[in-house]
Image (cartoon, rainbow, N blue to C red):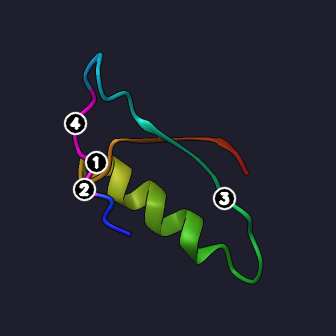
């Protein structure tokens, strides 16, 4: 899966993710770190 979704526009809004947590929650942390660094244009409305 190629997720090269770095900039939103009217035609390409942020990718909305639902993240399931098991263990330490490192996947969620990684997604949020990439979002904060501007590397991913995502929203995480559901955890």
Q: Quadrant of residue 10?
A: top left
Name the residue located 73 percent from the left edge and 64 percent from the top edge.
Answer: 20
For the residues labelled 2 and 3, say whether their Cβ atoms are less than 8 Å apart.
no
Whole-number angstrom distance, CA of label 3 to CA of label 4: 21 Å
Name the residue located 22 percent from the left edge and 36 percent from the top edge.
Answer: 7
Q: Which residue corresponds to mark 4? A: 7
Count neighbours of disc 4 (C-alpha within 10 A) and say few if under 14, some if 14 to 19, many if 20 or more.
some
User: In the rendering, which numbered label is found on residue 19?
Assistant: 3
Whole-number angstrom distance, CA of label 2 to CA of label 1: 4 Å
Q: Which residue corresponds to mark 1? A: 5
Whole-number angstrom distance, CA of label 4 to CA of label 2: 9 Å
Q: Which of pointers 1 and 3 indicates the residue nearer the eye?
A: 1
Q: Secondary structure at mark 2?
A: loop
For the residues labelled 2 and 1, say whether their Cβ atoms are less than 8 Å apart.
yes
Q: Which residue corresponds to mark 2? A: 4
User: Where residue 40 appears, x then y in whole percent?
Assistant: 31, 51
Q: Secondary structure at mark 1?
A: loop
User: Where residue 5 appears, x then y in whole percent?
Assistant: 28, 48
Over which residues does the magenta segment extend?
Answer: 4-8
Whole-number angstrom distance, CA of label 1 to CA of label 3: 17 Å
């Amino acid at each position: 899966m190629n997720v090269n979704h770095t900039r939103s526009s009217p035609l390409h809004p942020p990718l909305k993710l639902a993240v399931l947590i098991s263990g330490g929650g490192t996947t969620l942390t990684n997604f949020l770190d990439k979002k904060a660094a501007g590397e991913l244009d995502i929203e995480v409305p559901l955890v």
